[in-house]
Structures are given as structure tokens and as C-alpha cells.
Image (cartoon, helix red, strand yellow):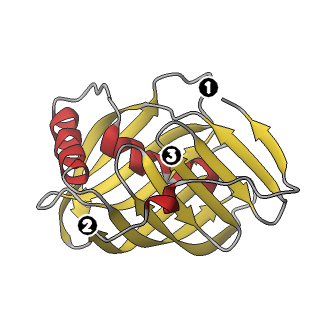
Amino acid sequence: MILRRSLTYLLIAASAAFSAPSKSAPSALKEIRKKYKATETFSCRFREVFEWKMTGESTAREGSILIGGEKRFRIETPEQLIIGDGAAIYRHNKLRGQVMIEGIIVEAGSLSPLAVENAEGFRLDLKPLDREKALVSEAMLWATTADYVVRRIQLVDLSGNQTTYYLTGIEFGPKSDPGQFQFNIPPGVELFDLR
């Protein structure tokens, strides 16, 4: 569900242009971008915790991420496959038999220093540049200062629901197949092209 937009912010943070009100945020964001741009590929496992604001209930699931540079990525969970090919994002909801195709969006942000995974780190707060088109009202990235690696992502949707991703098994430079970043629309799915 919220995974449809969720991890896209990590990818956009690594490659998109941001504007930030805080003097510290642009330099931190520059270092994060440099870290992720310096590698051709990146992979990790994640644990997603989604919290419904109205009910206080939460759900959790796990998945994997593979980033191939130039806004190319692959996110897999048992329920969904999300692929970014650099021009569009393809979201295949396996349970509903639906595919959505969307363009890539850009965010803006500010910075808060704090401890991340028992190390010195910071939280980068991101806000949509175009609130009318955004499905997420805010996003936060937690990164360690020593290596500028994003360790956690939290998103708040327009209804106030929160989704937090805890990243583990982070690997820079794993081997990948270019075919992993291509999406072939399965036969029989309901297609929504929102580009």
C-alpha cells in the first residue's frame, strides 16, 4: 500500500535536486547524494512498519531493494514489485492484479542532528515541492554522519499514517543484471498509467 511511494524517497534523495531552508541540510544532502552516486549499485533488506493514525494499529513486512543508479531501482515484497527505470515507476500489486505507472517526483528538506544506530547521525526532513501532486506529506531520512548511509526512512501520508523502513544488510556495489530494472506488464492485470 504505502510502499508504492515509500522507498522512492530514498532513491530520489540519492539523485534528485532538493532545496532546503537549513544551512546544514544542503551539505548533508550533498554528501548523501555523493555516497549513493559513487556506486553503480546498492542493495539492502528492509523491514517496513506501517502505523494507521486513526486506529493505532500497525502491520509489518519485509522486502529487498536494489538500486542501479540514474533513478533505476527494484523493490520487492511478497505482495508487490516496484521498478523504476529512470523515466517512470511501475508498481505491480500482485494481490490485486494491478499495475500503476507514475512519473518521478522531487522533494525539499531540512536537517536535525541526532544519534543513528548508536553512532553520530542526523535526520533529514523532506517536504514535497508540489504539495498538490504529492501523496506523502513528509519524509524523514536517518543517516550516519561518518559514512552518510541512510539507515531508516519514515514517511507520513496525507492522512497522518506513518510508515517506517529499517534498512539492514546494506551493500554498495553488488552485481546486478540490467534486466532487473525493466518491467514487463504481466498479461491480465488492470493497468493505470498516471504519467
Crowdedness near tag 1: few (<14), some (14–19) or many (≥20) residues, C-alpha within 10 Å: few
Residue type beneath disc 1 = Lys
Residue type beneath disc 2 = Phe
Q: Earlier in the sequence, mark 2 or mark 3?
A: 3
- The x, y position of residue 79, in whole percent, is 71, 69
- Identified at 46% across, 65% down, the residue is 65
Return the residue nearer the eye: 42 or 116.
42
Place residue 127 in its image quadrant. top left
Callouts 1 and 3 close, C-beta under 8 Å: no
Residue 161 seen from this side? no
Check disc 3 and report its element: helix, strand or loop: strand
Crowdedness near tag 3: few (<14), some (14–19) or many (≥20) residues, C-alpha within 10 Å: many
Query: Measured along the vertical axis of the image, is residue 82 above or below residue 156?
Result: below
For label 1, the residue is: 133
Return the residue nearer the eye: 89 or 139.
89
For label 2, the residue is: 172
Place residue 100 in its image quadrant. top right
Residue 39 seen from this side? yes
Numbered label attached to residue 85 = 3
